[in-house]
Image (tube, grey):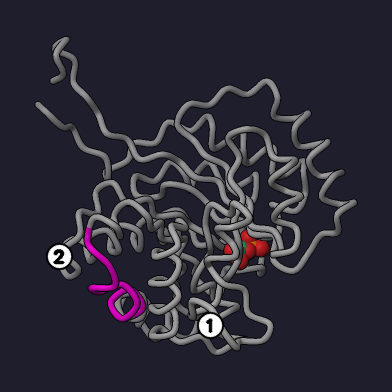
């Protein structure tokens, strides 16, 4: 209870994050925001944040066009602080252009660019050192799920990349997790709300029990073919605190609908807890 005798409830914010991948021109970005802003202008929201990760070179443009509380970030960063790493972009350079966050461990980086959990661990360290928030992605392939290995694989990804990577409080406050089953990304095949909830609850438990983190307030986003049609049912799950969206985030109309859903959903989350009572 606070001084006025009112229960104080800690609630995890909801996050809507657009991952634009390797898409968009400057002209398309300007057109996107002209429509998007128009569509969301009347929507009030108190407990929801909207973030977008465009290509590196578009970060300043998106920064200048996004409304006051929109946050802009990157889809990747180098595992090294600086130096002879031709073609890489450092966390420091991202911070320097006011990036708010960086996505680390996206399955496309893991699969196409062969980024392994130890390299991702280095990226997390360098991003934290440069005061960037991190969206750390984890998720199993279809084969792993069909073999009954989904929980083990996700557990391993978390353990290797996060265990002891930083102080508990840093992990708890600077890192958001995104559960993205690889079989659901860009395929139109979403995990059911129940499948996603099962994994999110498992992740929260694992963070608590194995990594000794206070996971109650750590945001866990779902990603993989999220659309305006399926987002409400996903966000209603108690352990799903937001969505990481690829394809549907590129269309201003769809992203505005996702925004409206994220702003409206009253989540019966299990992560938040009463304090001071
Ligand atoms: P999708 O992508 O929404 O197009 O499936 C999600 C992601 O890759 O983060």
Q: Ligand 1: give its quadrant.
A: bottom right
Magenta stretch: includes residue 134: no
Q: Is residue 72 left or right of residue 143?
A: right
Give the quadrant of residue 70.
top right
Farthest top residue?
4
Who's the residue at 56% across and 84% down the image? 83
First to last magenta residue range = 157-168
Give the quadrant of residue 88.
bottom right
- SS label for mark 1: helix
Q: In this view, does 39 lie to the left or right of 49?
A: right
195 or 5, which is in the foreground? 5
Q: Mark 2 points at which residue?
A: 209
In x, y percent, where is residue 128? 40, 63
In x, y percent, where is residue 265? 48, 33
Who's the residue at 48% across and 26% down the image? 46
Magenta stretch: includes residue 161: yes
Give the quadrant of residue 85.
bottom right
129 or 253, which is in the foreground? 129
Residue 110 - label: 1
Distance CA(mark 2)–CA(mark 1): 26 Å
Q: Is residue 262 left or right of residue 146?
A: right
Q: Are marks 2 and 1 in contact (CB under 8 Å)?
A: no
């Amino acid at each position: 209870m606070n001084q006025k005798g009112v229960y104080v409830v800690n609630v995890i914010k909801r996050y809507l994050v657009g991952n634009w991948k390797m898409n968009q021109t400057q002209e398309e970005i300007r057109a996107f925001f002209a429509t998007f802003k128009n569509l969301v202008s009347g929507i009030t929201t108190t407990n929801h944040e909207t973030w977008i990760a465009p290509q590196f070179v578009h970060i300043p443009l998106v920064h200048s066009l996004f409304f006051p509380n929109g946050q802009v970030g990157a889809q990747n960063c180098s595992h090294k602080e600086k130096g002879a790493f031709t073609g890489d972009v450092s966390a420091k350079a991202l911070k320097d252009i006011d990036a708010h966050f960086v996505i680390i461990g996206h399955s496309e980086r893991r699969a196409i660019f062969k980024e392994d959990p130890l390299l991702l661990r280095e990226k997390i360290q360098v991003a934290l050192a440069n005061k960037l928030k991190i969206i750390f992605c984890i998720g199993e392939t279809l084969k792993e799920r069909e073999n009954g290995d989904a929980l083990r694989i996700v557990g391993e990804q978390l353990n290797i990349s996060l265990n002891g990577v930083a102080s508990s409080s840093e992990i708890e406050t600077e890192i958001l997790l995104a559960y993205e089953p690889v079989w659901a990304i860009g395929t139109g095949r979403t995990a059911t709300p129940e499948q996603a909830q099962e994994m999110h609850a498992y992740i929260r438990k694992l963070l608590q029990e194995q990594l000794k983190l206070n996971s109650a307030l750590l945001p866990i986003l779902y990603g993989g073919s999220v659309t305006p049609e399926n987002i409400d049912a996903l966000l209603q799950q108690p352990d799903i605190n937001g969505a990481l969206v690829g394809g549907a985030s590129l269309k201003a109309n769809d992203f505005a609908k996702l925004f409206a859903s994220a702003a409206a959903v009253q989540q019966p989350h299990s992560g938040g807890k009463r304090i001071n009572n």
